[in-house]
């Protein structure tokens, strides 16, 4: 008996509804609705090799509608990936199963990116497509020549980030990006018409996209649309008209299938409707074989690619780029390469630029950019020419006023591999890209955020532009390393640490205003996160803990105290996450409990109790900033050496 | 000599360039480019009365491109508002001048909303336009009949929130919203073509908008476009083709005019070009008189409106709504009105719904909504029918999958007045709307955020959906009251506090899972932010500080400790901002320093040192969550009473 298209598609439907049923939790509607589209994609279009999920020239597949996770789990399983096994799927949404509620790139090799927060999968895919075109231009078709496919739902298309992402993709004419829109006309609350009356194809066309439609349940119609999408030189939106939960006879086409188990009766009715007579989690051998055959399509092109690579003149460099190893010592050496060019008093955003000049020269994998603040973020260097639709070999992206789109695209680039993205905006607008920063961290993606204008020190732009809660709130994001360097030396060290870190993002908070040199010696002290940058000369009674621009303030306070015979250390707490990771012994040595500990940071004092203890003193700003020249602001908010010194002396009763 | 149109427009240009020059900081390009459009608007179209900036039926004017703040300062000054004075303008961007770098609604009565973070002004205006149509439907044309005008630049249109905002406005057919797009083809980095190649009019049309164009320097063309916009029943985008920095002969049309002073030479050249011979900050009497005449246009319609109000049958209710006073005791009484209907063990999102049923019945000004999670956020009540393009009297908004757009719209509703908005999403997606939450707080806007699924307690959806850092990071936002109520009583109290608070936003973090009743007595204890919800029976050696769903865990821990003769208080820390605002005496009584203090919250432990001291114990989760049933997760992350109790006993050596 031959295995029909429907048999293969129904295998997905059955696994999806059975897994959700077993978990009594999950989203059967989308996988059942998109089973036919996905079957065409994974059978005849997508380039992949289950035997090597990390084959560099594979097509990238992104399930932007991540709640439909059972779709990708079913596909990976059926096409022959080592994981998930059928047991993994039977344990969907249970502790330690790699089949988590939403697809996680750290759980399964076949999952390219963690999705679930809507809109971001598609925006991440834009970054993957940029990385592909860039590497294609840097190397050639024989090594890099693949597509990025996305399945997105109405939620992904309604989110604001969709606008930013498709704007970038349309502008860069990323013709190898194809978005399959699951046009099922249903959201959680009901019909799409409840909340939207937009002409989505017209909007995509206005943004430089090619749009084509198909009946998402007719394989011939789907294939025809895919062919048109592949042929067009613009990015493509394929409108797939589908029925959510297709196959569940009483619930399909309604939001009832979206986010809950169908229930035993409906699952049974669906089995009948689909003609699927097999027990839960059983896929008959012939259907399994047919799916495995689909998965084997990639072996031959993969072997041919491997052949081309082995004889390629740039093989070594290509493999180095894909491996993504950047040695810390080498990075640091490059960062300090032409050190003498850095002037004595310089804004950290400026010393960052000077360091970047060196690093972008030494590491061609660095791709920079800014959300329309190039001259303020100081992210552009001589080595990084513009990456445009006419020159994908460029290394600098003008992202436009799209902070969130930039950040998600950087995630995609980092996850694609072969490039290391960095991008800039003002620190206060970290709020605009915070959901993507979190996904960088959750996904272990090497992205470097260059966040300048990091305090009231930016001056006149006032409260809307002055970070208060931002640095501390970013420090709370697990697996994100936040650096607030105090001078050019720390800037260079932080950059070296950031680009050599393979397993997560880093964020540099940089000043608009000039900063004095503070560091007088030592090598890569920033690695410890917090360290003594000045030691007490008189008997130590105070430890001043500061970051960034406030370290120079702390040094002045220290000098005042020492002048009165009060010994004071200054600790530069350049990265709390790195400091917290040090041994208790080290931390106890730097911040012993029996000395008055004082924090100074031009932001919220909340959280500094961790380092000062509750009886320490905390200087900062627990309200919104103000619009005025910088000197007036530091005076107004009490963050001058004189004011801080006086309060410490008062506390000491000295 | 008659005063020409150009004279009036050039008065704006001169004030803008002179103020920026004096401050040596600011953005002259936009005010100079949009001076003609603004002159037409404030002379012939905008309904306003400088003598009463808070006249309820005034048109709302929103300068979404807030960096062009000198435009609105010049307009308010010239048309006769009490502030800013010419001295205020001369002190632009200086400490204590109300003419801050960006327009702040708390500095000047004529500034309707704080702008600067791009895209949000326009999105806020959508909320104002919703409030207007709603109040028009609830009352009538004689009391509420005004427009909302926005000036937006390319930055506002490129930001993702633009997509969400215009999607809402198009769907609701907000025909009285008119956006004037400053189409100057320039962004900070250079020409718009550097980063975007979108057909903006086509995109707006695809989203249900009317689009009309004009020459932004030709008053007749501008007026014709305004007339078309006013006549159309859809929201309108008026594309105003302008030259940035118009009048500065050597710099106009380039990004050099955008964000820096023109310099003395160019200012002098501009004076010549414009034929503006007057000294800085001098506006000749005849031009001043012409502008004041424009400002006086509103006096007559204002008087007529006052007349209509005085004889209106619903005058009392209208005035009550506009005043916006909600008495705390009355709100609490309503919240507890049909108390017995609340079941014994109930999710806080569900008790929130039950409370909302009462409150929406008692307070018709409450307007609810959700970003497509109505059934999960439990925000819909019987009293709140859908607000649609066909029924603006409805009180529930289906915002779609637009968390940020929803939040900004709520800001606009709150700032408009007459309504009190609340809206829901998952707590983890507070990241998506964080920039708007910050602006609620900065602007003292009464918005209530209903954030459900507030911890790993949501279970199977996994790490992308489980808040870790969110609650603490929200607590850091100045002027935002965050509540994490532990049971139905605290939910009711928190709601009463939230809606009766006039000067800022509140956020309720609510559970998906059922919670036991914990409170046994007391009235409005939530007002204190933190209080003893259980007192030690044995000699007190421990204080357990917990929030939300972890309070019931703390009570179990306490019972275990008491069973061993170890006295333990349980403190419910329902709102840290409220607790921090209590007297030192009160705080010291609740959390004395000489007892082991232990925090329990299913989120980051960062920051809890403030309440436990550094030698206390902190139970929480400092990494990402996992996908599994709730019970497994609490066990996995060590947040069960047994595990916590054991560690406390170990610490006590008991």
Image (cartoon, coloured by chain):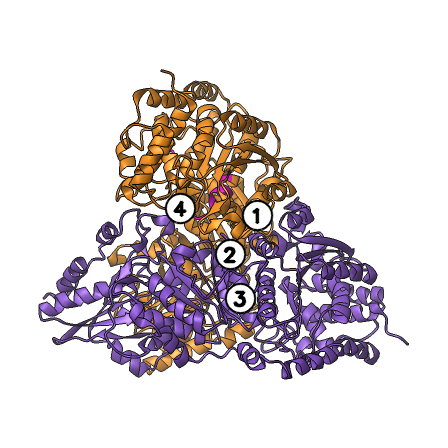
Chain colours: A purple, B orange
Magenta segment:
B109-125
Q: Secondary structure at mark 3?
A: helix
Q: Are marks 1 and 2 on the same chain?
A: no
Q: Are marks 3 and 4 on the same chain?
A: no
Residue B47 screen position, x and y as percent: 46, 26
B56 to B398, vertically: above or below? above
- Which of the 4 image quadrants contains residue A145? bottom right
Which is in the foreground here, disc 3 or disc 4?
Answer: 4
Q: Is residue A574 visible?
A: no
Circle 1 residue? B163
Question: What whole-number distance in Å separates the C-alpha atoms at marks 3 and 4?
Answer: 32 Å
- Quadrant of the snapshot with the N terminus of chain B: top left
Question: What whole-number distance in Å separates the C-alpha atoms at marks 4 and 1?
Answer: 29 Å
Circle 2 residue? A399
In which chain is the residue bearing label 4? B
Q: Earlier in the sequence, mark 4 or mark 1?
A: 1
């Amino acid at each position: 008996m031959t295995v029909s298209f429907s048999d293969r598609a129904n295998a997905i439907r059955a696994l999806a509804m059975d897994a959700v049923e077993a978990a009594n939790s999950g989203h059967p509607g989308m996988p059942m609705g998109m089973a036919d589209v996905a079957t065409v994609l994974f059978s005849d279009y997508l380039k992949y090799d289950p035997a090597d999920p990390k084959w560099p020239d594979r097509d990238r597949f992104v399930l932007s509608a991540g709640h439909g996770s059972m779709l990708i789990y079913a596909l990976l399983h059926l096409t022959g990936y080592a994981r998930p096994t059928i047991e993994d799927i039977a344990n969907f949404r249970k502790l330690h199963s790699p089949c988590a509620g939403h697809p996680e790139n750290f759980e399964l090799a076949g999952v390219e990116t963690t999705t679930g927060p809507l809109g971001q999968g598609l925006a991440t895919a834009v970054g993957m497509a940029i990385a592909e075109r860039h590497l294609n231009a840097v190397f050639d078709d024989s090594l890099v020549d693949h597509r990025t496919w996305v399945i997105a739902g109405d939620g992904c298309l309604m989110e604001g980030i969709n606008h930013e992402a498709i704007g970038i993709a349309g502008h860069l004419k990323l013709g190898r990006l194809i978005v399959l829109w699951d046009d099922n006309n249903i959201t959680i609350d009901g019909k799409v018409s409840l909340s939207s009356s937009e002409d989505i194809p017209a909007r995509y066309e206005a943004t430089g996209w090619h749009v084509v439609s198909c009946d998402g349940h007719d394989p011939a119609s789907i294939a025809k649309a895919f062919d048109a999408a592949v042929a067009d030189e613009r990015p493509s939106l394929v409108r797939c008209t589908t029925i959510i939960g297709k196959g569940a006879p009483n619930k399909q086409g309604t939001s009832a299938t979206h986010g809950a188990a169908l229930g035993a009766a409906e699952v049974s009715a669906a089995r009948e409707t689909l003609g699927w007579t097999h027990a839960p989690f059983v896929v008959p051998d012939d259907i399994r074989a047919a799916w495995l055959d689909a998965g084997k399509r990639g072996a031959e092109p993969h072997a041919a690619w491997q052949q081309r690579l082995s004889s390629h003149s740039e093989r070594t460099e290509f493999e180095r780029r894909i491996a993504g190893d950047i040695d810390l010592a080498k990075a640091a050496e490059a960062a300090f390469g032409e050190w003498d060019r850095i002037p004595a008093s310089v804004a950290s955003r400026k010393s960052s630029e000077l360091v970047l000049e060196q690093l972008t020269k030494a590491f061609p994998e660095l791709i920079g950019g800014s959300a329309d603040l190039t001259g303020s973020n100081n992210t552009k260097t001589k080595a990084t020419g513009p990456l445009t639709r006419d020159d994908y070999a460029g290394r600098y992206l003008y992202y436009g006023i799209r902070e969130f789109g930039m950040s998600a695209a950087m995630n995609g680039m980092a996850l694609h591999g072969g490039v290391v993205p960095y991008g800039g905006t003002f620190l206060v607008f970290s709020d605009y890209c915070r959901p993507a920063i979190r996904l960088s961290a959750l996904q272990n993606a090497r992205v470097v955020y260059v966040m300048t204008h990091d305090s009231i020190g930016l001056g006149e732009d006032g409260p809307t532009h002055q970070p208060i809660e931002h640095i501390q709130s970013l420090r709370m994001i697990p697996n994100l390393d936040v650096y607030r360097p105090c001078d050019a030396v720390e800037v260079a060290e932080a950059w070296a640490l950031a680009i050599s870190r393979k397993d997560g993002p880093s964020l540099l908070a940089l000043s608009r205003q000039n900063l004095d040199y503070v560091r007088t010696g030592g090598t890569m002290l920033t690695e410890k996160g917090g360290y003594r940058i000045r030691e007490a000369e008189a008997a130590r009674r105070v430890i001043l803990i500061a970051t960034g621009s406030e370290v120079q303030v702390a040094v002045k306070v220290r000098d005042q105290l020492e002048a009165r015979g009060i010994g004071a250390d200054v600790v530069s707490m350049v990265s709390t996450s790195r400091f917290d990771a040090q041994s208790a012994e080290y931390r106890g040595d730097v911040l012993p409990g029996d000395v008055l500990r004082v924090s100074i940071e031009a932001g919220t004092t909340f959280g500094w109790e961790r380092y000062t203890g509750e009886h320490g003193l905390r200087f900062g700003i627990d309200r919104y900033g103000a619009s005025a020249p910088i000197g007036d602001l530091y005076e107004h908010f009490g963050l001058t050496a004189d004011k801080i010194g006086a309060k410490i002396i008062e506390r000491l009763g000295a």
